[in-house]
């Protein structure tokens, strides 16, 4: 039993090193010019105000087997965007006013259908002059093709351009004393401002422009459903067959509950990346026989996707569990009257979606 315990520890260590060496897909924004006639501003600062991992901007699928990669900018979001905008939207006239872009959300994602792939870019931006918030914009753009991985870069630039164009549009509308049908004035607008953007005197609260050709089933907040349902052997506790449901509460953590014949479980999963199908460590309380044996388990697991269109696949996990309590008769039956080990093998396999 001692050798079995050591093998489990070695297995977990090897897979822990593997899973934390995540594959990375680097995105470098291309060089182009953003053409906005009679533009009243230029961007002189970009602030990354996202609440998520500052390096991560989404998951892409690439390679012969569409392996998942974590997408990142080459030198971080702030550096990537300001470098791009200094070339694409440089100051070209003396009347142009410097503004600051605060990025609240920037995320890319992919969806595979029966006939093609869809790629999405979701961005939320606030524009500031000094400390005064002028305008907010949410843009959601999409592209489609047989392999859209290399199209993400252009799609990000498209989302950025739409944000900038929307900002300039509202500058002009408000300067003329009107209001765009997609806007409303801020409840705390001021009667005057030192900001001279087409004589703009009032901040605008927000706008959201969504292209009609996007996938309506994709969430506008850019967050896919990462909850997982599983059914199988030793799933949902120490069960012959059981059911387990995980709720992903953040990029790296999930909580799960399960039950089956006969037993139940509850615990927490620590994921190794924000993607839905990332490898995970499962720390859980396990029951066998509805009170016959209780244990605390630590397992390493992952999913093998069989159908990308439905996210259906196999789930496997292996590790160790420490026995907390055990019924005497059940103990004699399980271990054939030999000494009860301090820890035993934990293993589970099943279907998931």
Image: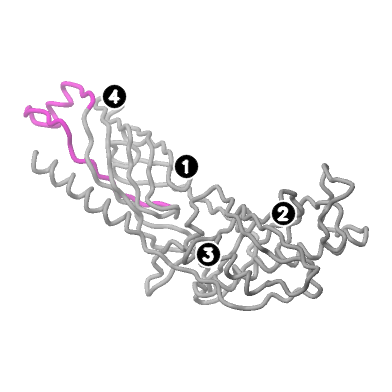
Q: Which residues are magenta?
A: 324-353
- Circles 4 and 2, Cβ within 8 Å, touching? The answer is no
In front: mark 1 or mark 2? 2
Asked which secondary structure carries label 4, the reply is loop
Total marks placed: 4
From mark 3 to mark 1, how far is it between C-alphas?
21 Å
Mark 4 residue crowding within 10 angstroms, few (<14) / some (14–19) / many (20+): some
Colouring? one colour
Check disc 2 and report the residue beneath it: 128
From mark 4 to mark 3, how far is it between C-alphas?
43 Å
Q: Is residue 129 magenta?
A: no
Rendering coords of residue 20 (x, y %):
32, 54
In front: mark 3 or mark 2? 2
| N-term mark: 1 or 4 | 1
Check disc 4 and report the residue beneath it: 291
Label placed on residue 247: 1
Q: Is residue 351 magenta?
A: yes
| N-term mark: 3 or 1 | 3
Label placed on residue 111: 3
């Amino acid at each position: 039993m001692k050798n079995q315990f050591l093998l489990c520890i070695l297995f977990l260590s090897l897979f822990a090193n593997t899973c934390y060496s995540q594959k990375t897909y680097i995105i470098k924004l291309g060089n182009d010019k953003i053409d906005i006639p009679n533009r009243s501003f230029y961007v002189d600062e970009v602030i990354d105000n996202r609440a998520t991992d500052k390096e991560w901007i989404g998951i892409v699928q690439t390679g012969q087997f569409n392996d998942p990669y974590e997408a990142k900018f080459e030198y971080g979001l702030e550096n990537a965007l300001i470098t791009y905008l200094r070339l694409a939207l440089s100051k070209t006239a003396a009347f142009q006013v410097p503004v600051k872009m605060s990025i609240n959300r920037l995320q890319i994602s992919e969806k595979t259908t029966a006939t093609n792939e869809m790629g999405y870019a979701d961005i939320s931006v606030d524009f500031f002059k000094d400390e005064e918030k002028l305008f907010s914009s949410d843009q959601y753009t999409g592209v489609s093709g047989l392999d859209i991985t290399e199209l993400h870069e252009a799609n990000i630039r498209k989302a950025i351009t739409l944000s900038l164009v929307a900002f300039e549009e509202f500058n002009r509308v408000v300067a003329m004393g009107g209001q765009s049908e997609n806007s409303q004035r801020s409840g705390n607008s001021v009667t005057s401002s030192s900001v001279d953007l087409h004589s703009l005197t009032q901040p605008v609260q927000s706008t959201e422009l969504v292209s009609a050709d996007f996938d309506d089933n994709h969430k506008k907040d850019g967050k896919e459903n990462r909850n997982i349902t599983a059914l199988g052997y030793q799933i949902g506790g120490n069960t012959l067959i059981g059911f387990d449901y995980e709720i992903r509460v953040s990029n790296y953590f999930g909580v799960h509950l399960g039950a089956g014949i006969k037993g139940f479980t509850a615990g927490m999963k620590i994921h190794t990346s924000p993607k839905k199908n990332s490898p995970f460590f499962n720390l859980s309380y396990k029951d066998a026989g509805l009170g016959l044996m209780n244990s605390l388990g630590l397992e390493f697991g992952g999913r093998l996707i069989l159908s990308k269109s439905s996210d259906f696949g196999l789930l496997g996990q292996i590790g160790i569990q420490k026995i907390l309590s055990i019924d005497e008769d059940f103990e004699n039956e399980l271990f054939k009257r030999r000494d009860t080990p301090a820890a035993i093998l934990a293993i589970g396999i099943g279907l998931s979606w």
